[in-house]
Image (spheres, rainbow, N blue to C red):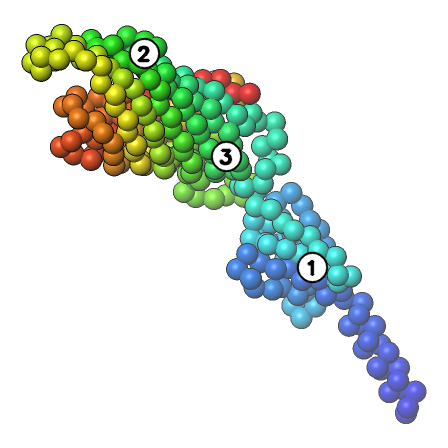
Amino acid sequence: MKNIFYLFLILNFISITGFSQDRIIKVTHDTIKCQIKEIGDDEVKYTQQNLYGDVVFGIDKNKIHQIIFSDGKELKIKDSMYDSEQYEKQHKNAVKVGFLSPLFGATSFTFEHNLKPGSSIEATLGIIGLGDNINGDSSEGIYLKFGYKFIKSPDYYFKGTQYAHILKGTYIRPEISLLTYSEIPNIDNYYTSGSGARETVTMFAIMLNTGKQWIVNNRFLFDWFIGAGYGFGDAKNSNAFRFAFLGGGTDSKLVLTSGIRIGVLF
């Protein structure tokens, strides 16, 4: 009798240990105890002892945070949407020029660098005086803009979904702007105020922009945006055009901006 009992314990122990208890940790922090059978590009297949050991289940890898195997080894699972390895062959930097900016007296140059899927940083340098000023005055100076771009992800996710290009898509860009320039009022201002002395304008603005960027052949881009925010500074004249934005004078703190940029990727 004892031999039968010990044999039963041994067989029971073998049956328990023979089914390795791997663990799938889902992004919702739920745990699935199972035996991993296959890890594919899009799906993980597994069996569960308490749910018919010969039935194979499948789970989308994007729903998995981590796999812990029975021997203690761990495997991190990355969402295909935000896995940087998916975009290794795509250019992650761009240089852009304000397409119409020379017509408004300040040519702008922008550098964009992708930090990770869905996020980029931008820095813009505007050279005031490099171009034709539609106001007819003579202005010289610079403006700087720094922004963080949040690129919108798809509304619906399917298996294997990823960005068409890491820099492409609709975006929201919080931004700060700094500008300083000197100007000589045009002839109308001269006769109105009786003064043609050079005036210095220094301003600061906090803005929120939204736009969309298109990528062509992983080499060229087209970017369009609009934005609004608050402007602060020592602008005393009534001219609402500030090169980097519109507004922010003595009457109102509201500033507006828009632009079209073209550029190349590298």
Q: Which residue is mark 3?
A: 163
Identity of the amino acid at label 2?
Gly
Check disc 2 and report the residue beneath it: 129
Q: Nearer the viewer, residue 214 or 8?
A: 214
Determine crowd level at label 2: few under 14, some 14-19, many 20+ residues with C-alpha closer than 10 A: many
Which element carries disc 1, helix, strand or loop?
Answer: strand
| SS class, disc 3 | loop
Mark closest to the chain's N terminus, 3 or 1 = 1
- Residue 9 in sight from this viewpoint: yes
Residue 162 in view here? no
Q: In this rendered view, identify the residue nearer to me: 228 or 250.
A: 250
Judged from this view, the residue extending furthest toward the bottom is 1
In the visual, does 78 lie left or right of 106?
Answer: right
Relative image position of residue 177 (x, y in whole percent): 34, 30
- In the rendered image, the quadrant that contains the N terminus is bottom right
At 12% across and 10% down in the image, what residue appears?
Answer: 190
Amino acid tagged 3? Tyr
Label 3 CA crowd tier, 10 Å (few <14, some 14–19, many 20+): some
Using the rendered view, name the quadrant where residue 89 is placed.
top right
Spot occupied by residue 151 in the image (x, y as percentages of width and height): 43, 36
Q: Where is residue 130 drawn, in percent x and y? A: 34, 10
Q: Which residue is mark 1?
A: 68
The answer to the question of whether label 2 and label 3 lie on touching residues, with beta carbons closer than 8 A, is no
**Residue 80 image offset from top left, x and y in percent:** 57, 42
